[in-house]
């Protein structure tokens, strides 16, 4: 049978029985749209979690002083005071792979101003800190390089501090005293929330590190250096680069261990990624089951259809159709219905994802591979579940089939 | 695909046809040695009570079934040893079928129904399937009903569509199985008139029936009983369906129509 005729015959059969076609397709429509929506929600959640990880810092690397040992007694991590502001400056000037470097000098102080006083961690940082932590300023602005160089007495408040001292939200421009040193509030940071360990990231006061050194702590040692790579792919190389530069700066012999540690956020990101991937997979698995059920629905109706059309099949065989023609006709019908159902399902799934995103505020993402996969799967379901009914139709005896009532 | 018919060969040449069915443990011998030769242009009736084997014979002559023993050549081509698909090609190109129940595809126009056998044509020739189907429908007098579904046609018209479908491939033989079994007397005669017309144009027709009134319009009657031919002879007073129809119309007032 010519391929054009085959498609014509199968197409006619599909369009002349609209109700049956619709019922057959329903399972696939629901299955495919379920897959699309579920995967879209999963992918949306994944995207959200990725953004939250980014929120911790863009491709951030943390350099901390290494352990020091006195007479064979190791004092544990971060016991040394081996990192200096100069280290940060060297890193900043010598590295190729780092988009930002900032020393962090931390101290504590009672902050007095606004409606009262508040004890908060003070972080002496460089301008890059804002970029590295990917931390937006919601009011005012972050201090700039000039402020740092000229040791300005300026602070940027974390959200918690701002809310407690200036509940009216008019912090910017006001004065604040840290250890009796008056400071001007130039900005308020966006709320970041808690860290995984439960400490409040917003309970912080950022001050130019020069100001902390000269006015508040007087220390040359920094508690950590934050740096960020240009992209997440660069993180391992950047890590190695930091190591090389610092070893050189610290004058370490090749047999000496590092007196500092460089860490990235990779582990956390990996764990979170894995969690969402498992979740997406789970959602897809559940949705696939509905696609499978849809496929069984196709087989069911195709089987009924073969029985119902026994006389038609007998007639076609009598008029000269080969068993293979009848088989192909039923297979094409099944595949066309699955694919058409699949396309409809994609449309409905797409619309539903958009609706869910609008009404719940979840971010959903319909990806092209998912759509293609769902369509491909729908087609495969059509072939797989259409095969048995088609085989049965093809093996009918024309005499029996013509006599069938 | 099928071999060309030798010129002058009879359309049907069957020798010693036997057909045995296994029904559970018992053997049912539906045909017990049937010899039948049908020449080109013949119109014959195969008659017999139910169980006489006429359906079995029809199935074998229609290449839908194979004899247990004996030989059968259609158009001089032996069908012995042909595969299922080769038989399908023979049915498609050399045979036309007319059934008692019409067997038209529902929700499918008359034209598309008639076109159906051409869609299964496997010869490489280019066919104007729509044009051929339209011509066949015109031939049976349904030029103005081509776009109608079977549900919109009367029984007689449906059977005309079926006849057009049987003719569209220009077969060597048209097999009609109780073609008027579902029709009233008047329509029966109309259909028989059409058959006689077609026969006059050279179509070879084999009609299976149990009604003597039908067989009257053929040229030759073959009667079966218990799987054997008990009578094979020409019709003595052949009826002319069209004349009879006109006679009926004259007898009955116009209101009966």
Image (cartoon, coloured by chain):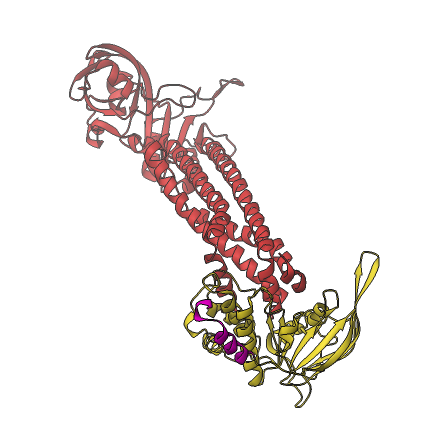
- The one nearer the camera, A132 or A237, is A132
User: Does A302 lie within the magenta span?
Assistant: no
- The one nearer the camera, A74 or A53, is A53
The quarter holding residue B202 reads bottom right
Give the answer, above or below, for where A232 lies relative to A216: below
The spot of residue B208 in percent (x, y) is: 66, 72
Give the answer, above or below, for where A103 lies relative to B66: above
**Residue at 38% of width from left, 31% of height from top?**
A52
* Magenta residues (range): B241-257
User: Does B254 lie within the magenta span?
Assistant: yes
The spot of residue B155 in percent (x, y) is: 52, 65
Screen quadrant of the N terminus of chain B: bottom right
Q: Which chain is red?
A: A
The quarter holding residue A363 reads top left
Give the answer, above or below, for where A53 lies relative to A330: above
**Residue at 60% of width from left, 77% of height from top?**
B93
């Amino acid at each position: 049978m010519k391929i054009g005729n085959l498609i014509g015959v199968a197409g006619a059969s599909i369009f002349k029985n609209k109700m049956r076609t619709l019922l057959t397709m329903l399972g696939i429509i629901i299955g495919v749209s379920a897959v699309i929506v579920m995967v879209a929600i999963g992918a949306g959640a994944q995207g959200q979690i990725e953004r939250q990880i980014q929120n911790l810092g863009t491709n951030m690397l943390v350099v901390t002083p290494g352990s020091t040992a006195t007479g064979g007694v190791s004092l544990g991590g971060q016991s040394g005071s081996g990192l200096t502001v100069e280290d940060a400056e060297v890193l900043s000037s010598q590295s190729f792979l780092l988009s930002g470097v900032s020393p962090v000098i931390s101290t504590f102080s009672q902050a007095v101003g606004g409606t009262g006083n508040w004890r908060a961690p003070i972080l002496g940082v460089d301008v890059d800190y804002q970029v590295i932590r990917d931390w937006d300023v919601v009011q005012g602005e972050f201090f700039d390089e000039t402020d740092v160089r000229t040791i300005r007495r300026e602070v940027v408040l974390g959200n918690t501090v701002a809310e407690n001292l200036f509940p009216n939200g008019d912090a910017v421009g006001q004065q604040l005293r840290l250890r009796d040193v008056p400071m001007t509030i130039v900005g308020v940071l966006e709320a970041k929330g808690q860290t995984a360990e439960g400490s409040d990231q917003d309970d912080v006061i950022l001050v130019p590190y020069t100001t902390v050194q000269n006015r508040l702590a007087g220390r040359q040692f920094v508690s950590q250096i934050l740096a960020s790579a240009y992209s997440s792919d660069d993180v391992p190389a950047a890590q190695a680069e930091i190591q090389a530069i610092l070893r050189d700066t610290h004058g370490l012999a090749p047999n000496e261990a590092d007196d500092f540690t460089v860490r990235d956020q990779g582990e956390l990101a990996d764990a979170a990624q894995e969690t969402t991937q498992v979740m997406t997979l789970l959602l897809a698995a559940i949705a696939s089951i509905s696609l499978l059920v849809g496929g069984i629905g196709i087989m069911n109706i195709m089987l009924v259809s073969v029985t119902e059309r026994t006389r038609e099949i007998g007639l076609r065989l009598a008029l000269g159709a080969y068993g293979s023609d009848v088989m192909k006709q039923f297979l094409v019908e099944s595949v066309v219905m699955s694919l058409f159902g699949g396309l409809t399902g994609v449309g409905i799934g797409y619309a539903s994802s958009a609706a869910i995103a609008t009404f719940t505020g979840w971010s959903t993402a319909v990806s092209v591979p998912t759509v293609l996969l769902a369509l491909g799967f729908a087609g495969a379901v059509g072939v797989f579940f259409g095969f048995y009914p088609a085989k049965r139709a093809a093996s009918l005896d024309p005499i029996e089939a013509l006599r069938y009532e | 695909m099928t071999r060309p018919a030798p010129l002058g060969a009879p359309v049907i040449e069957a020798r010693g046809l036997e057909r045995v069915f296994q029904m559970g443990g018992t053997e049912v011998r539906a045909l017990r040695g049937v010899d039948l030769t049908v020449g080109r242009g013949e119109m014959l009736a195969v008659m017999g009570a139910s169980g006489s084997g006429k359906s079995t014979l029809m199935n074998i002559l229609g290449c839908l079934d194979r004899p247990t023993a004996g030989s059968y050549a259609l158009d001089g081509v032996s069908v012995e040893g042909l595969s299922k698909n080769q038989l399908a090609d023979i049915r498609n190109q050399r045979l036309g079928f007319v059934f008692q129940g019409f067997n038209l595809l529902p929700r499918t126009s008359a034209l598309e129904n008639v076109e159906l056998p051409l869609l299964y044509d496997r010869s490489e020739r280019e066919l104007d399937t729509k044009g051929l189907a339209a011509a066949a429908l015109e031939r049976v007098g349904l030029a103005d009903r081509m776009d109608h579904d079977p549900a919109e046609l009367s029984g007689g018209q449906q059977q005309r569509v079926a006849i057009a479908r049987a003719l569209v491939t220009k077969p060597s033989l048209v097999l009609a199985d109780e073609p008027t079994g579902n029709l009233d007397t008047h329509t029966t005669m109309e259909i028989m008139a059409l058959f006689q017309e077609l026969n006059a144009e050279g179509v070879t027709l084999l009609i299976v029936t149990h009604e003597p009134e039908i067989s009257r319009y053929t040229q030759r009657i073959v009667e079966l009983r218990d799987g054997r031919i008990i009578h094979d002879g020409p019709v003595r007073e052949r009826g002319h369906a069209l004349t009879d129809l006109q006679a009926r119309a004259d007898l009955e007032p116009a209101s009966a129509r």
